[in-house]
Amino acid sequence: MPLKRLAKFFAGPLPHLSREEALKVFKRDHFKCYYCGLDGLDKYENWLILTIDHVHPHAKGGARSMNNLVTSCQPCNLIKGKRIYKSLQEAKEYVLTKREEWRQVFLQQVKAE
């Protein structure tokens, strides 16, 4: 068993970001998804799906520092996943491309029914 997995087994998962830390990121980013621009202050339902994304995934060794955290909506965070990108811009381009691909699939499915 790799050492990291052993450490997690004995020590448990690392704690989540505190509410205060998350709010600092949300405020810095004006409650907007970095990837798609969803405005969390526009309506309550948008605010509900905002999350904090680790630019360099925490699961792959990314830090919990402010320069590695951005505001993201849940769909964009899910699309970005745990992949490692050369830059934040590359991650954004990937997410927007995938969102558009999924939009086309959705539209095709709606027309088919």
Image: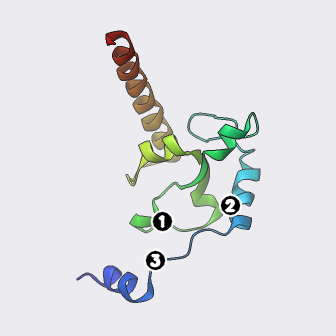
- From the top left corner, tell me how far across and down residue 55 is, in percent: 51, 54
Question: Which disc is residue 32 wearing?
Answer: none
Seen from the viewer's position, the closer of residues 74 and 63 is 74
Residue in the picture at 67% in, 69% down: 18
Residue 77 falls left or right of residue 104:
right
Label whose residue precedes the other's in the sequence (1 or 2): 2
- Are there few (<14), some (14-19), or many (20+) residues within 10 Å of tag 1? some
Where does the C terminus fall, quadrant-wise? Answer: top left
Seen from the viewer's position, the closer of residues 40 and 61 is 40
Residue 20 falls left or right of residue 112:
right
- From the top left corner, tell me how far across and down residue 76 is, in percent: 50, 41
- From the top left corner, tell me how far across and down residue 37 is, in percent: 63, 34
Determine the secondary structure under disc 2.
helix
Measure how far apart labels 3 and 1 are at the Cα level.
15 Å
Query: Do the numbered discs 1 and 2 sit on residues whose CB atoms are within 8 Å?
Result: no
Residue in the picture at 74% in, 66% down: 20
What residue type is disc 1 on?
A: Gly
Q: Residue furthest top?
A: 111
Q: Which residue is mark 3?
A: 13
Label whose residue precedes the other's in the sequence (3 or 1): 3
Measure how far apart labels 2 and 3 are at the Cα level.
18 Å
Query: Do the numbered discs 2 and 3 sit on residues whose CB atoms are within 8 Å?
Result: no
What residue type is disc 3 on?
A: Pro
Tell me where residue 8 sits by quadrant.
bottom left
- Are there few (<14), some (14-19), or many (20+) residues within 10 Å of tag 3? few
Vertical order, 7 against 92 (above or below)? below
Vertical order, 111 against 15 (above or below)? above
- From the top left corner, tell me how far across and down residue 6 is, in percent: 32, 85
Q: Which residue is mark 1?
A: 62
Q: Which residue is mark 2?
A: 22
Residue 32 falls left or right of residue 59:
right
